[in-house]
């Protein structure tokens, strides 16, 4: 899956994530939002929507646009890609490199420890 988005794809995805909720957003309403937010014509909105549906981010069923990949899931996928490509899949190596450039606060360390503890508990 191609998780890279261009600038306008990202802005469009952000708009859908912000406005769609659990039930999704009617595509006609999305057209109106894009007209006011981006000054897009209806055809531009549907072209961009098709592109992001083809990439697997959203689906348009019966005129309702629904999220397939949430904003948080995309962020996790990007993080995994970075760790895999730059640190051979080693999260400890990534954290060591990150901590070597930025001092971690006590709150950061506590939050990391809490995540580790939760992970160990399952």
Image (tube, grey):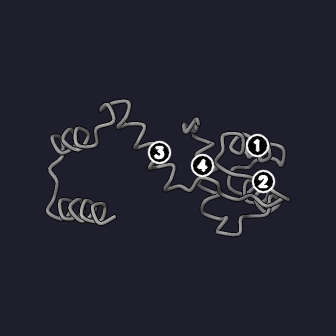
Using a 10 Å C-alpha cutoff, classify the residue at mark 3 as few (fewer than 14 neighbours), some (14 to 19) or many (20 or more). Answer: some
Discs 2, 1 touching: Cβ within 8 Å: yes
- Side (left or right) of 57 relative to 78: right
Circles 2 and 4 in contact, beta carbons < 8 Å: no
Q: Which residue is mark 3?
A: 77
User: What residue is drawn where x is 81% and y is 47%?
Assistant: 41
- Foreground mark, 3 or 4, reads 3
Q: Closer to the camera: disc 2 or disc 4?
A: 2
Q: Residues within 10 Å of mark 2 (few under 14, many from 20)?
A: some
Q: Secondary structure at mark 3?
A: helix
Find numbered disc 4 in the image and state the secondary structure of the residue it sits on: helix
How far apart marks 3 and 1 lie (CA) works out to: 21 Å
Residue that mark 4 sits on: 11
Q: Which label sits in the foreground, 3 or 1? A: 3
From mark 2 to mark 4, how far is it between C-alphas?
Answer: 18 Å
In the displayed structure, would residue 81 be above or below residue 13? above
Q: Are there few (<14), some (14-19), or many (20+) residues within 10 Å of tag 4?
A: some
Question: Which disc is residue 37 wearing?
Answer: none
Mark toward the start of the polypeptide (3 vs 4): 4
Rendered image quadrant of residue 19 = bottom right
Q: Is residue 76 above or below residue 1?
A: below
Q: CA distance from mark 4 to mark 1?
A: 15 Å
- What SS does tag 1 mark? helix
Residue at the spot of label 2: 60
- The alpha-carbon separation of the residues under discs 2 and 3 comes to 22 Å
Percent x, y for residue 3?
A: 55, 39
- Structural distance between the alpha carbons of marks 2 and 1: 8 Å
Does label 2 or label 4 sit earlier along the sequence?
Answer: 4
Residue on which the image places disc 1:
50
Across and down, in percent, residue 113 comes to: 20, 61
Q: Is residue 58 left or right of residue 5?
A: right
């Amino acid at each position: 899956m191609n998780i890279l988005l261009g600038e306008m794809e990202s802005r469009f995805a952000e708009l859908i994530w912000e406005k769609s909720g659990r039930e999704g957003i009617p595509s006609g309403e999305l057209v109106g939002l894009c007209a006011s937010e981006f000054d897009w014509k209806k055809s531009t909105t549907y072209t961009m929507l098709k592109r992001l549906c083809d990439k697997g981010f959203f689906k348009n069923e019966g005129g309702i646009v629904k999220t397939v990949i949430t904003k948080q899931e995309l962020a996790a996928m990007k993080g995994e890609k970075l760790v895999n490509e730059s640190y051979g899949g080693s999260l400890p190596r990534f954290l060591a490199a990150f901590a070597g450039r930025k001092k971690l606060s006590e709150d950061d360390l506590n939050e990391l420890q809490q995540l580790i503890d939760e992970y160990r508990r399952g």
